[in-house]
Image: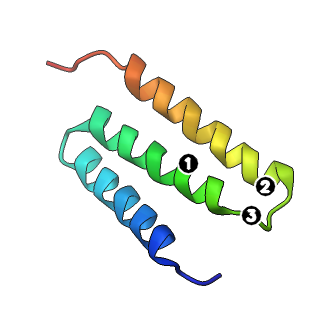
Amino acid sequence: MSLTPFSLASYAVIGFGLLLGIFGVVRGGSILIAAGCAAIAISQRNERVIGRFLPLAMAVALFALAIALPRGR
């Protein structure tokens, strides 16, 4: 697995989402993690169908969950 600039940026988005989640911005962190995971799943061209679309489906589910979270204030 080689790190292209696109995958490196995706990992950076995931890491930033984790940091946001740790420091209390859970909704924004979840959305960034979902976006980064979706970008990585879409870029996997050599994977089989299940190896590509299962992570994409999980990223979409995480995005939907992040949107559905109530505000914690």
- Give the vertical position of 26 relative to 13 (above or below): above
Type of residue at label 3?
A: Arg
Q: Residue at x 57, y 59 (%)?
A: 40
**Relative image position of residue 30 (x, y in whole percent):** 38, 39
Marks 2 and 1 in Cβ contact (< 8 Å): no
- Colour scheme of the picture: rainbow
- The CA span between labels 2 and 1 is 12 Å
**Quarter of the figure with the N terminus:** bottom right
- Give the vertical position of 53 relative to 68 (above or below): below
**Relative image position of residue 23 (x, y in whole percent):** 18, 47
Q: Residue at x 56, y 41 (%)?
A: 59
User: Which of disc 1 and disc 2 is earlier in sequence?
Assistant: 1
User: Which residue lies under the disc numbered 1?
Assistant: 38
- The CA span between labels 2 and 3 is 10 Å
**Quarter of the figure with the C terminus:** top left
User: Which residue lies under the disc numbered 3?
Assistant: 45
